[in-house]
Structures are given as C-alpha cells and as structure tokens.
Image (cartoon, rainbow, N blue to C red):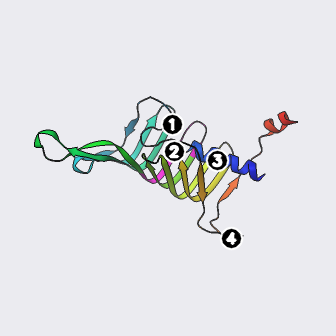
Amino acid sequence: MRIRLLSTMAVLVAAAALPAAAQLTNSDAPVDITADELEVVNTECTATWRGNAEALQDTSRLRAQVLRLVNQRGAAKPGGAAGSSCGEMERMEAEGQVFYVTPQQRVRADKGVYVASTEMLTMTGDVVAVQGQNVIRGTRMVINTRTGQGQMVGAATGRNAQGRVRGVIYPNKQNQAAAR
C-alpha cells in the first residue's frame, strides 16, 4: 500500500508540475492570458495580470486572482536609451485561490511560484491535488517539473496531529483484475 500511495502521489505531484510560467503543457501552442487588468513595469521587467487572471495553453489552465511574470533584467538598451532590456522569464507568481487544471488532474493552493532556472514549482497554503477520485492534501508542495519528482509537506508532524499530509487513494480495480 505504501508503494501504491507513493506512486500515486508522484503522479499527482508530477502532473501538477508542468512549467506554469513558460508553458502550461509540453506544447508549442501559444499561451493565452486574460485578466481584468494588466500592469507592466518595464524598468522592473514585470507584468502583473490582476483580477480573475487565467492562462490557457492547449488543454491546461492556470487561474488565480493575480499572475505576475518576472523576467530577467538584461543589459542597458543600445544607443544610450534609458532603462534596461528584459530577457527570458525568471519566475511566475500566482496568488489568491490558485488553480492548475489539466484533463487528468486539478491542483488548488493559495499561492504558487514557478522558477524557470531550476524548473521548480512550489505551491503553498491549503494545497489539494486531485486525480480522478484520489486526493492528496498538505500545506506545501514542491515539484521538479523536469524530473517529475515532488514532495508534499504538512503543517504538523506526529500521530493524530492536525495538519499532517493526508491522501485518500482509491484502488484501480481494472489493474488489480488484470494482474490476477
């Protein structure tokens, strides 16, 4: 049962770990972002989408009240123009009822941060990962989006403590029948 629980958790965590900032899926499809408002601060290389922000790519969706893209700061603009240029995306921050949804799974959290250079996605707060009927809940989920390795952490430790990591895993009856 422990191996089944760990493998199911790995699937849930890995599935939620696709690079939310650069792309939502392993796809060349464009990322379509909408929100009630957009604020761009070129001197800080940030773009902040506020109010029911939603990023869609292929069949994946990232929703939050605020999506903030932070790009790397580049060298000064050629010709002595004021400011600097902005380079590749450094990180994407999602705040306020964060939802990451694909056809196979759903993850909800209070906050999410994807760091492009390390390919790590961290979701914090009340984190709930769902795949089919299977549910895993904790307070912090960290996933390496390249390898799919992840970890769910709770707010407490020790037997019977409130806030421990909890999973409800339903057996796959088709797989059990095929193995017999």
Give the secondary structure at mark 2: strand
User: How far is the residue under mark 1 from the one under mark 4?
Assistant: 36 Å
User: How far is the residue under mark 3 from the one under mark 2?
Assistant: 16 Å
Q: Nearer the viewer, mark 1 or mark 3?
A: 3
Q: Residue furthest top?
A: 28
Q: Earlier in the sequence, mark 3 or mark 2?
A: 3
Number of other residues with Cα within 10 Å of mark 4, as a class: few under 14, some 14 to 19, many 20 or more: few
Residue of label 4: 158
Q: Residue at x 30, y 45 (%)?
A: 38
Residue 169 showing in the rendered view: no
Q: Nearer the viewer, mark 3 or mark 2?
A: 3
Q: Which mark is residue 169?
A: none
Residue of label 1: 60
Residue of label 3: 10
Give the secondary structure at mark 4: loop
Q: Earlier in the sequence, mark 1 or mark 3?
A: 3
Q: Residue at x 54, y 53 (%)?
A: 142
Give the secondary structure at mark 3: helix
Amino acid carrying label 1: it is: Ser
Q: Where is residue 171 drawn, in percent x and y?
A: 77, 45
| Tag 2 near tag 1, CB within 8 Å | yes
Give the secondary structure at mark 1: strand
Q: Nearer the viewer, mark 1 or mark 4?
A: 4
45 lies left or right of 125: left
Q: Which mark is residue 100?
A: 2
- Residue 36 magenta: no
Q: Earlier in the sequence, mark 2 or mark 1?
A: 1
Q: Is residue 22 above or below residue 113?
A: above
81 lies left or right of 92: left
Amino acid carrying label 2: it is: Tyr
**Stretch in magenta:** 94-106
Q: Earlier in the sequence, mark 2 or mark 4?
A: 2
